Image: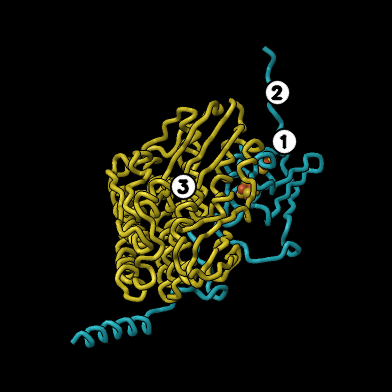
Chain colours: A yellow, B cyan
Protein backbone atom coordinates (compact mmCIF):
# COMPACT_ATOMS: atom_id res chain seq x y z
CA UNK A 1 0.00 0.00 0.00
CA UNK A 2 1.46 3.31 -0.95
CA UNK A 3 0.81 6.36 1.15
CA UNK A 4 -0.29 9.74 -0.12
CA UNK A 5 2.27 11.94 -1.82
CA UNK A 6 2.82 15.49 -0.61
CA UNK A 7 4.89 18.26 -2.14
CA UNK A 8 7.08 20.20 0.30
CA UNK A 9 8.66 23.41 -0.97
CA UNK A 10 12.28 23.78 0.11
CA UNK A 11 14.11 27.09 -0.37
CA UNK A 12 14.95 29.56 -1.82
CA UNK A 13 15.08 30.84 1.76
CA UNK A 14 15.62 28.14 4.29
CA UNK A 15 17.38 28.19 7.67
CA UNK A 16 19.84 25.44 6.83
CA UNK A 17 20.42 26.24 3.18
CA UNK A 18 22.66 29.23 2.56
CA UNK A 19 21.91 29.30 -1.14
CA UNK A 20 18.81 30.53 -3.00
CA UNK A 21 17.76 27.42 -4.87
CA UNK A 22 14.21 26.14 -4.76
CA UNK A 23 13.32 22.46 -4.68
CA UNK A 24 9.86 20.97 -4.78
CA UNK A 25 10.23 17.80 -2.78
CA UNK A 26 7.67 15.13 -3.57
CA UNK A 27 7.54 13.07 -0.39
CA UNK A 28 5.89 9.84 0.59
CA UNK A 29 5.96 9.52 4.37
CA UNK A 30 9.45 10.69 5.24
CA UNK A 31 11.00 9.68 1.94
CA UNK A 32 11.71 11.96 -0.97
CA UNK A 33 10.44 10.40 -4.18
CA UNK A 34 11.44 13.16 -6.49
CA UNK A 35 13.03 16.59 -6.27
CA UNK A 36 12.13 19.21 -8.86
CA UNK A 37 14.58 22.13 -8.87
CA UNK A 38 13.79 25.63 -10.02
CA UNK A 39 16.42 28.31 -10.40
CA UNK A 40 16.50 31.97 -11.37
CA UNK A 41 16.15 33.82 -8.05
CA UNK A 42 19.39 35.75 -8.21
CA UNK A 43 19.98 36.35 -11.91
CA UNK A 44 21.97 39.55 -12.40
CA UNK A 45 22.50 39.63 -16.17
CA UNK A 46 26.22 40.11 -15.68
CA UNK A 47 27.23 38.48 -18.96
CA UNK A 48 25.30 40.96 -21.07
CA UNK A 49 27.45 43.83 -19.78
CA UNK A 50 30.25 42.53 -21.96
CA UNK A 51 29.29 44.66 -24.95
CA UNK A 52 29.40 47.85 -22.88
CA UNK A 53 32.81 47.39 -21.27
CA UNK A 54 36.36 47.20 -22.56
CA UNK A 55 37.46 43.60 -22.59
CA UNK A 56 40.36 44.50 -20.32
CA UNK A 57 38.07 46.14 -17.74
CA UNK A 58 35.63 43.26 -17.91
CA UNK A 59 38.11 41.18 -15.92
CA UNK A 60 36.89 43.03 -12.81
CA UNK A 61 33.32 42.07 -13.64
CA UNK A 62 34.19 38.47 -14.53
CA UNK A 63 35.83 38.22 -11.12
CA UNK A 64 32.59 39.26 -9.45
CA UNK A 65 30.59 36.39 -10.95
CA UNK A 66 31.30 34.49 -7.76
CA UNK A 67 32.53 35.54 -4.36
CA UNK A 68 34.40 32.32 -3.64
CA UNK A 69 35.76 31.22 -7.01
CA UNK A 70 36.49 34.85 -7.87
CA UNK A 71 40.14 34.34 -8.70
CA UNK A 72 39.51 31.41 -11.04
CA UNK A 73 36.82 33.34 -12.89
CA UNK A 74 39.19 36.20 -13.59
CA UNK A 75 42.04 33.90 -14.59
CA UNK A 76 39.79 31.84 -16.86
CA UNK A 77 38.51 34.98 -18.54
CA UNK A 78 42.04 36.31 -19.04
CA UNK A 79 43.16 32.93 -20.30
CA UNK A 80 40.37 33.07 -22.89
CA UNK A 81 41.30 36.52 -24.14
CA UNK A 82 44.98 35.56 -24.20
CA UNK A 83 44.15 32.42 -26.17
CA UNK A 84 42.14 34.46 -28.63
CA UNK A 85 44.85 37.03 -29.13
CA UNK A 86 47.72 34.56 -29.08
CA UNK A 87 49.38 36.11 -26.04
CA UNK A 88 51.95 34.01 -24.20
CA UNK A 89 52.08 35.11 -20.55
CA UNK A 90 55.41 35.02 -18.67
CA UNK A 91 56.21 31.85 -16.70
CA UNK A 92 56.24 33.65 -13.37
CA UNK A 93 52.71 34.92 -14.02
CA UNK A 94 51.63 31.39 -14.91
CA UNK A 95 53.00 30.09 -11.62
CA UNK A 96 51.50 32.94 -9.61
CA UNK A 97 48.07 32.32 -11.13
CA UNK A 98 48.39 28.67 -10.19
CA UNK A 99 49.47 29.61 -6.67
CA UNK A 100 46.49 31.88 -6.11
CA UNK A 101 44.21 29.33 -7.76
CA UNK A 102 45.31 26.73 -5.23
CA UNK A 103 44.97 29.17 -2.33
CA UNK A 104 41.40 29.82 -3.51
CA UNK A 105 40.77 26.12 -3.51
CA UNK A 106 42.04 25.91 0.07
CA UNK A 107 39.79 28.72 1.26
CA UNK A 108 36.80 27.44 -0.69
CA UNK A 109 37.11 23.88 0.61
CA UNK A 110 37.57 25.13 4.17
CA UNK A 111 34.50 27.31 3.77
CA UNK A 112 32.57 24.32 2.51
CA UNK A 113 33.75 22.09 5.34
CA UNK A 114 32.56 24.74 7.78
CA UNK A 115 29.16 25.06 6.15
CA UNK A 116 28.83 21.31 5.97
CA UNK A 117 29.62 20.97 9.67
CA UNK A 118 27.02 23.66 10.32
CA UNK A 119 24.42 21.76 8.27
CA UNK A 120 25.14 18.69 10.37
CA UNK A 121 24.62 20.79 13.51
CA UNK A 122 28.30 20.60 14.51
CA UNK A 123 28.91 24.26 15.33
CA UNK A 124 32.32 24.12 16.96
CA UNK A 125 33.72 22.29 13.95
CA UNK A 126 32.29 25.03 11.76
CA UNK A 127 34.15 27.70 13.75
CA UNK A 128 37.39 25.75 13.58
CA UNK A 129 37.19 25.32 9.80
CA UNK A 130 36.61 29.04 9.34
CA UNK A 131 39.40 29.89 11.75
CA UNK A 132 41.86 28.06 9.52
CA UNK A 133 40.32 29.68 6.46
CA UNK A 134 41.08 33.07 7.97
CA UNK A 135 44.82 32.43 7.83
CA UNK A 136 44.50 31.48 4.16
CA UNK A 137 42.57 34.70 3.50
CA UNK A 138 45.32 36.66 5.25
CA UNK A 139 47.88 35.26 2.81
CA UNK A 140 45.58 36.19 -0.05
CA UNK A 141 45.19 39.73 1.23
CA UNK A 142 48.88 40.16 1.87
CA UNK A 143 49.84 39.02 -1.63
CA UNK A 144 47.00 40.39 -3.76
CA UNK A 145 45.39 43.18 -1.75
CA UNK A 146 41.96 41.58 -1.49
CA UNK A 147 40.57 38.93 0.81
CA UNK A 148 38.02 37.34 -1.49
CA UNK A 149 38.02 39.60 -4.55
CA UNK A 150 41.68 39.57 -5.44
CA UNK A 151 41.62 41.81 -8.51
CA UNK A 152 45.10 40.69 -9.41
CA UNK A 153 44.65 39.06 -12.81
CA UNK A 154 44.85 41.08 -15.97
CA UNK A 155 45.02 40.26 -19.63
CA UNK A 156 48.69 39.56 -20.28
CA UNK A 157 49.67 38.38 -16.81
CA UNK A 158 49.14 39.47 -13.22
CA UNK A 159 49.16 42.91 -11.58
CA UNK A 160 51.40 42.21 -8.61
CA UNK A 161 54.50 40.19 -8.06
CA UNK A 162 55.22 38.39 -4.81
CA UNK A 163 58.79 38.59 -3.59
CA UNK A 164 60.68 35.34 -3.17
CA UNK A 165 61.25 36.14 0.51
CA UNK A 166 57.57 36.47 1.09
CA UNK A 167 56.96 33.22 -0.76
CA UNK A 168 59.30 31.31 1.52
CA UNK A 169 57.55 32.88 4.51
CA UNK A 170 54.27 31.57 3.13
CA UNK A 171 55.83 28.15 2.86
CA UNK A 172 56.78 28.21 6.56
CA UNK A 173 53.36 29.40 7.64
CA UNK A 174 51.77 26.53 5.71
CA UNK A 175 53.23 24.06 8.21
CA UNK A 176 51.03 25.36 11.00
CA UNK A 177 48.02 25.47 8.70
CA UNK A 178 48.66 21.91 7.64
CA UNK A 179 48.77 20.73 11.26
CA UNK A 180 45.50 22.44 12.06
CA UNK A 181 43.90 21.02 8.93
CA UNK A 182 45.01 17.53 9.82
CA UNK A 183 43.22 17.81 13.14
CA UNK A 184 40.11 19.18 11.46
CA UNK A 185 39.98 16.62 8.68
CA UNK A 186 40.38 13.83 11.20
CA UNK A 187 36.99 14.78 12.65
CA UNK A 188 35.28 14.90 9.26
CA UNK A 189 36.62 11.57 8.13
CA UNK A 190 36.69 9.54 11.35
CA UNK A 191 34.17 10.95 13.77
CA UNK A 192 31.39 8.52 14.54
CA UNK A 193 28.60 11.13 14.56
CA UNK A 194 29.65 12.76 11.31
CA UNK A 195 30.00 9.39 9.61
CA UNK A 196 26.55 8.40 10.78
CA UNK A 197 25.10 11.43 9.06
CA UNK A 198 26.97 11.24 5.75
CA UNK A 199 27.89 7.62 4.96
CA UNK A 200 25.56 6.11 2.39
CA UNK A 201 23.56 9.35 2.04
CA UNK A 202 23.15 10.98 -1.36
CA UNK A 203 24.26 8.04 -3.45
CA UNK A 204 25.52 8.77 -6.94
CA UNK A 205 26.99 5.87 -8.88
CA UNK A 206 30.00 6.36 -11.12
CA UNK A 207 27.89 5.62 -14.19
CA UNK A 208 25.28 8.20 -13.15
CA UNK A 209 27.93 10.78 -12.34
CA UNK A 210 29.36 10.32 -15.80
CA UNK A 211 26.01 10.23 -17.60
CA UNK A 212 24.66 13.29 -15.79
CA UNK A 213 27.82 15.24 -16.51
CA UNK A 214 28.86 15.81 -12.90
CA UNK A 215 32.08 17.76 -12.44
CA UNK A 216 34.57 18.49 -9.70
CA UNK A 217 34.47 16.78 -6.32
CA UNK A 218 30.97 15.43 -7.11
CA UNK A 219 32.36 13.40 -10.01
CA UNK A 220 35.59 12.54 -8.21
CA UNK A 221 33.67 11.45 -5.10
CA UNK A 222 31.94 8.91 -7.31
CA UNK A 223 35.19 7.56 -8.68
CA UNK A 224 35.21 9.49 -11.98
CA UNK A 225 38.65 10.98 -12.51
CA UNK A 226 37.50 14.25 -14.07
CA UNK A 227 39.70 17.25 -13.42
CA UNK A 228 40.65 20.04 -15.80
CA UNK A 229 44.01 20.30 -14.07
CA UNK A 230 44.93 17.12 -15.93
CA UNK A 231 44.80 19.09 -19.19
CA UNK A 232 48.01 20.92 -18.31
CA UNK A 233 46.82 24.50 -18.29
CA UNK A 234 48.72 27.15 -16.31
CA UNK A 235 51.59 25.49 -14.43
CA UNK A 236 49.96 22.13 -13.81
CA UNK A 237 51.95 20.55 -16.63
CA UNK A 238 55.20 21.22 -14.79
CA UNK A 239 53.78 20.17 -11.44
CA UNK A 240 52.66 16.70 -12.54
CA UNK A 241 49.10 16.70 -11.35
CA UNK A 242 47.14 13.57 -10.37
CA UNK A 243 43.45 13.88 -9.39
CA UNK A 244 42.16 12.58 -6.09
CA UNK A 245 39.21 10.23 -6.27
CA UNK A 246 37.08 8.41 -3.74
CA UNK A 247 34.90 5.49 -4.59
CA UNK A 248 32.26 5.40 -1.89
CA UNK A 249 29.90 7.30 -4.26
CA UNK A 250 28.09 9.09 -1.40
CA UNK A 251 28.28 12.22 0.70
CA UNK A 252 31.26 10.81 2.57
CA UNK A 253 33.14 10.31 -0.70
CA UNK A 254 32.61 13.91 -1.73
CA UNK A 255 33.69 15.11 1.70
CA UNK A 256 36.76 12.87 1.56
CA UNK A 257 37.79 14.22 -1.85
CA UNK A 258 37.62 17.80 -0.60
CA UNK A 259 39.50 16.95 2.60
CA UNK A 260 42.30 15.26 0.67
CA UNK A 261 42.41 18.05 -1.87
CA UNK A 262 43.31 20.43 0.94
CA UNK A 263 46.60 18.60 1.42
CA UNK A 264 47.07 18.20 -2.30
CA UNK A 265 46.74 21.97 -2.69
CA UNK A 266 49.29 22.52 0.07
CA UNK A 267 51.69 20.18 -1.75
CA UNK A 268 51.10 21.98 -5.05
CA UNK A 269 51.70 25.35 -3.38
CA UNK A 270 54.98 24.06 -1.93
CA UNK A 271 56.06 22.83 -5.36
CA UNK A 272 55.14 26.18 -6.89
CA UNK A 273 57.12 28.07 -4.26
CA UNK A 274 60.25 26.01 -4.88
CA UNK A 275 59.93 25.92 -8.69
CA UNK A 276 58.73 29.42 -9.46
CA UNK A 277 60.96 31.02 -12.11
CA UNK A 278 62.13 34.63 -11.86
CA UNK A 279 61.17 37.22 -14.41
CA UNK A 280 58.41 39.56 -15.47
CA UNK A 281 54.84 39.06 -14.41
CA UNK A 282 53.06 40.62 -17.36
CA UNK A 283 53.46 41.42 -21.03
CA UNK A 284 52.11 44.44 -22.89
CA UNK A 285 48.89 43.78 -24.76
CA UNK A 286 48.09 45.42 -28.07
CA UNK A 287 45.07 45.02 -30.30
CA UNK A 288 41.62 43.60 -29.76
CA UNK A 289 40.30 40.05 -29.63
CA UNK A 290 38.75 38.68 -32.79
CA UNK A 291 37.17 35.23 -33.08
CA UNK A 292 35.79 32.83 -30.52
CA UNK A 293 37.33 30.81 -27.73
CA UNK A 294 36.43 28.31 -25.05
CA UNK A 295 38.47 28.68 -21.91
CA UNK A 296 38.37 25.98 -19.21
CA UNK A 297 39.66 25.82 -15.66
CA UNK A 298 39.20 23.73 -12.57
CA UNK A 299 37.46 25.69 -9.85
CA UNK A 300 37.10 24.40 -6.30
CA UNK A 301 33.61 23.24 -7.33
CA UNK A 302 34.57 21.74 -10.66
CA UNK A 303 35.07 22.66 -14.26
CA UNK A 304 34.16 26.16 -15.41
CA UNK A 305 33.89 27.16 -19.06
CA UNK A 306 34.03 30.70 -20.38
CA UNK A 307 32.91 31.20 -23.96
CA UNK A 308 34.24 34.41 -25.47
CA UNK A 309 33.53 35.93 -28.86
CA UNK A 310 35.04 39.15 -30.14
CA UNK A 311 34.83 41.03 -33.42
CA UNK A 312 38.05 42.98 -33.43
CA UNK A 313 36.72 45.90 -31.36
CA UNK A 314 37.47 46.59 -27.72
CA UNK A 315 34.06 45.26 -26.69
CA UNK A 316 33.39 41.55 -26.90
CA UNK A 317 30.20 40.52 -28.67
CA UNK A 318 29.38 37.52 -26.55
CA UNK A 319 30.35 36.05 -23.23
CA UNK A 320 28.86 32.97 -21.67
CA UNK A 321 29.84 31.10 -18.54
CA UNK A 322 28.99 27.57 -17.57
CA UNK A 323 29.62 27.16 -13.89
CA UNK A 324 30.17 23.86 -12.08
CA UNK A 325 27.08 24.16 -9.89
CA UNK A 326 24.76 24.21 -12.90
CA UNK A 327 26.33 21.03 -14.22
CA UNK A 328 25.95 19.37 -10.84
CA UNK A 329 22.23 20.09 -10.42
CA UNK A 330 21.08 17.04 -12.45
CA UNK A 331 23.38 14.90 -10.30
CA UNK A 332 21.86 16.50 -7.19
CA UNK A 333 18.34 15.65 -8.36
CA UNK A 334 19.39 12.05 -8.83
CA UNK A 335 21.00 11.96 -5.34
CA UNK A 336 17.87 13.30 -3.69
CA UNK A 337 15.53 10.68 -5.13
CA UNK A 338 14.97 8.14 -2.39
CA UNK A 339 16.63 9.98 0.47
CA UNK A 340 15.05 10.92 3.76
CA UNK A 341 13.54 14.35 4.21
CA UNK A 342 15.85 15.19 7.13
CA UNK A 343 18.91 14.52 4.98
CA UNK A 344 17.95 16.88 2.16
CA UNK A 345 19.85 19.96 3.43
CA UNK A 346 23.14 18.15 3.92
CA UNK A 347 22.84 16.28 0.59
CA UNK A 348 22.26 19.58 -1.20
CA UNK A 349 25.38 20.89 0.52
CA UNK A 350 27.53 17.98 -0.62
CA UNK A 351 27.55 19.35 -4.17
CA UNK A 352 28.91 22.63 -2.73
CA UNK A 353 26.23 24.72 -4.42
CA UNK A 354 27.04 28.27 -5.43
CA UNK A 355 23.80 29.59 -6.83
CA UNK A 356 25.05 33.16 -7.12
CA UNK A 357 27.58 32.16 -9.73
CA UNK A 358 25.32 29.59 -11.33
CA UNK A 359 22.81 32.32 -12.28
CA UNK A 360 25.22 35.24 -12.65
CA UNK B 1 42.10 1.75 29.26
CA UNK B 2 40.38 3.07 26.13
CA UNK B 3 38.29 5.37 28.32
CA UNK B 4 41.45 6.81 29.86
CA UNK B 5 42.92 7.58 26.41
CA UNK B 6 39.73 9.43 25.41
CA UNK B 7 39.69 11.32 28.71
CA UNK B 8 43.31 12.39 28.17
CA UNK B 9 42.49 13.60 24.67
CA UNK B 10 39.53 15.57 25.94
CA UNK B 11 41.57 17.06 28.75
CA UNK B 12 44.17 18.20 26.24
CA UNK B 13 41.52 19.88 24.12
CA UNK B 14 39.92 21.53 27.14
CA UNK B 15 43.23 22.91 28.41
CA UNK B 16 44.06 24.19 24.93
CA UNK B 17 40.70 25.93 24.67
CA UNK B 18 41.02 27.53 28.08
CA UNK B 19 44.54 28.79 27.67
CA UNK B 20 44.80 30.11 24.15
CA UNK B 21 44.04 33.73 23.26
CA UNK B 22 40.82 34.52 21.39
CA UNK B 23 41.32 34.27 17.63
CA UNK B 24 39.04 37.22 16.93
CA UNK B 25 40.01 40.87 17.40
CA UNK B 26 37.95 43.35 19.36
CA UNK B 27 37.20 45.77 16.57
CA UNK B 28 36.99 48.82 16.80
CA UNK B 29 38.95 48.88 20.09
CA UNK B 30 41.71 47.02 18.28
CA UNK B 31 42.32 48.22 14.72
CA UNK B 32 41.41 45.90 11.87
CA UNK B 33 44.35 44.00 10.41
CA UNK B 34 45.76 45.31 7.19
CA UNK B 35 48.68 44.60 4.94
CA UNK B 36 50.85 46.72 2.77
CA UNK B 37 49.01 45.47 -0.30
CA UNK B 38 45.50 45.89 1.14
CA UNK B 39 43.19 47.85 -1.08
CA UNK B 40 41.56 50.26 1.38
CA UNK B 41 40.39 53.35 -0.43
CA UNK B 42 41.20 55.54 -3.42
CA UNK B 43 43.05 58.82 -2.92
CA UNK B 44 42.81 61.59 -5.51
CA UNK B 45 45.39 64.28 -6.15
CA UNK B 46 43.57 67.30 -7.65
CA UNK B 47 46.79 69.04 -8.58
CA UNK B 48 47.67 66.51 -11.28
CA UNK B 49 44.32 65.76 -12.92
CA UNK B 50 43.97 67.02 -16.48
CA UNK B 51 40.25 66.14 -16.64
CA UNK B 52 40.86 63.66 -19.41
CA UNK B 53 37.77 61.65 -18.22
CA UNK B 54 39.40 58.28 -18.89
CA UNK B 55 38.70 57.17 -15.34
CA UNK B 56 35.03 58.11 -15.70
CA UNK B 57 34.67 56.16 -18.94
CA UNK B 58 36.45 53.06 -17.76
CA UNK B 59 35.58 52.64 -14.08
CA UNK B 60 33.70 49.32 -14.01
CA UNK B 61 31.38 50.54 -11.26
CA UNK B 62 30.76 53.99 -12.79
CA UNK B 63 31.74 55.57 -9.51
CA UNK B 64 33.69 58.52 -10.94
CA UNK B 65 32.34 61.63 -12.66
CA UNK B 66 34.48 64.36 -14.14
CA UNK B 67 32.96 67.76 -14.84
CA UNK B 68 35.36 69.36 -17.29
CA UNK B 69 33.60 72.74 -17.47
CA UNK B 70 33.51 73.32 -13.70
CA UNK B 71 36.69 71.40 -12.89
CA UNK B 72 35.00 69.09 -10.43
CA UNK B 73 36.03 65.46 -9.92
CA UNK B 74 33.77 63.25 -7.81
CA UNK B 75 33.87 59.71 -6.55
CA UNK B 76 30.91 57.87 -5.11
CA UNK B 77 32.45 55.88 -2.27
CA UNK B 78 29.47 53.59 -2.10
CA UNK B 79 29.66 52.65 -5.77
CA UNK B 80 33.43 52.25 -5.88
CA UNK B 81 34.36 48.58 -5.57
CA UNK B 82 38.02 49.42 -4.85
CA UNK B 83 39.27 47.40 -7.77
CA UNK B 84 42.20 49.75 -8.34
CA UNK B 85 41.57 49.82 -12.09
CA UNK B 86 41.49 53.62 -12.26
CA UNK B 87 45.00 53.84 -10.79
CA UNK B 88 46.38 52.00 -13.80
CA UNK B 89 44.14 53.75 -16.30
CA UNK B 90 45.04 57.30 -15.26
CA UNK B 91 48.02 58.30 -17.34
CA UNK B 92 48.77 61.32 -15.14
CA UNK B 93 49.18 59.34 -11.90
CA UNK B 94 46.58 61.32 -9.93
CA UNK B 95 45.11 58.29 -8.24
CA UNK B 96 46.60 56.06 -5.61
CA UNK B 97 45.51 53.48 -3.07
CA UNK B 98 45.74 53.66 0.70
CA UNK B 99 45.58 50.52 2.75
CA UNK B 100 43.20 51.71 5.47
CA UNK B 101 39.59 50.69 5.19
CA UNK B 102 37.00 53.41 5.62
CA UNK B 103 34.81 53.10 8.70
CA UNK B 104 31.18 52.17 8.23
CA UNK B 105 28.95 55.11 7.32
CA UNK B 106 25.62 55.92 5.72
CA UNK B 107 25.45 57.61 2.30
CA UNK B 108 24.34 60.82 4.04
CA UNK B 109 27.48 60.87 6.19
CA UNK B 110 29.96 60.04 3.50
CA UNK B 111 28.64 59.51 0.03
CA UNK B 112 29.99 61.38 -2.91
CA UNK B 113 33.38 62.99 -2.37
CA UNK B 114 33.89 66.13 -4.44
CA UNK B 115 37.24 67.62 -5.35
CA UNK B 116 38.02 70.83 -7.15
CA UNK B 117 40.68 70.18 -9.74
CA UNK B 118 43.58 72.54 -9.23
CA UNK B 119 45.74 71.42 -12.11
CA UNK B 120 47.10 74.21 -14.25
CA UNK B 121 48.34 73.39 -17.70
CA UNK B 122 52.03 74.23 -17.85
CA UNK B 123 53.16 76.64 -20.52
CA UNK B 124 54.48 74.65 -23.37
CA UNK B 125 57.87 75.85 -24.56
CA UNK B 126 57.20 77.28 -28.02
CA UNK B 127 58.58 75.16 -30.79
CA UNK B 128 60.86 77.00 -33.09
CA UNK B 129 59.63 76.99 -36.68
CA UNK B 130 62.11 75.12 -38.72
S1 LIG C 1 38.81 51.65 -7.71
FE1 LIG C 1 37.64 50.70 -9.36
S2 LIG C 1 35.52 51.06 -8.83
FE2 LIG C 1 36.74 52.46 -7.58
S3 LIG C 1 36.77 54.35 -8.74
FE3 LIG C 1 38.60 53.18 -9.33
S4 LIG C 1 38.01 52.02 -11.13
FE4 LIG C 1 36.12 52.75 -10.16
S1 LIG D 1 41.98 61.32 -12.55
FE1 LIG D 1 43.39 60.80 -14.18
S2 LIG D 1 42.13 59.60 -15.61
FE2 LIG D 1 40.73 60.70 -14.27
S3 LIG D 1 40.25 62.60 -15.35
FE3 LIG D 1 41.96 63.03 -13.99
S4 LIG D 1 43.76 62.72 -15.27
FE4 LIG D 1 42.08 61.72 -16.32
Residue matched to label 2: B126
Residue matched to label 1: B121
Given the current orientation, which residue lies at the most extreme right position? B70
Reply above or below: A318 against A248.
above
Q: Residue at x 74, y 64 (%)?
A: B109
Given the current orientation, which residue lies at the most extreme front position? A1
At which x and y percent is residue A288? 56, 28
Dot 1 crowding, Cα within 10 Å, few <14, some 14–19, many 20+ = few
- Give the alpha-carbon distance from disc 2 to disc 3, as whole Å: 52 Å
- Give the alpha-carbon distance from disc 3 to disc 1, as whole Å: 43 Å
Is disc 2 placed on a helix, strand or loop?
Answer: loop
Q: Residue at x 29, y 86 (%)?
A: B11
Q: Which subunit holds the residue at mark 2?
A: B
Task: State which mark lies toward you, 3 or 1.
Answer: 3
Reply above or below: A223 against A18.
above
At which x and y percent is residue B118? 73, 45
At which x and y percent is residue A246? 30, 56
Q: Quadrant of residue B65?
A: top right
Is residue A306 visible in the rendered image? The answer is yes
Q: Which subunit holds the residue at mark 3?
A: A
Task: State which mark lies toward you, 2 or 1.
Answer: 1
Of residues A33 and A249, the one drawn nearer to the viewer in this rendering:
A33
Reply above or below: A134 against B87.
below
Residue A72 numbered mark, or none: 3
Q: Are marks 3 and 1 in contact (CB under 8 Å)?
A: no
Dot 3 crowding, Cα within 10 Å, few <14, some 14–19, many 20+ = many
Dot 2 crowding, Cα within 10 Å, few <14, some 14–19, many 20+ = few
Amino acid sequence: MSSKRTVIPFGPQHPVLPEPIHLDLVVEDEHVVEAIPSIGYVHRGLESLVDRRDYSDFVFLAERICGICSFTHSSTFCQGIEGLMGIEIPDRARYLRTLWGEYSRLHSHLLWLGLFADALGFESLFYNAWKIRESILNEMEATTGGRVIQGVCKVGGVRRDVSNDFLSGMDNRLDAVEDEMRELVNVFLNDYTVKKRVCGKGKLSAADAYALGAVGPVARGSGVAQDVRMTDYLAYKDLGFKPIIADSCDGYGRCEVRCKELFQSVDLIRRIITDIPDGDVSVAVKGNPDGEYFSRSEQPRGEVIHYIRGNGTKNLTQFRVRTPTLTNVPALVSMLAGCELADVPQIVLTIDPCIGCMER
Amino acid sequence: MYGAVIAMKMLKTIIKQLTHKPVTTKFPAEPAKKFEATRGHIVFDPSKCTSCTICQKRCPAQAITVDRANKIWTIDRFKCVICGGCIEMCKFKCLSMENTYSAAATPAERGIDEYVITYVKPERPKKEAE
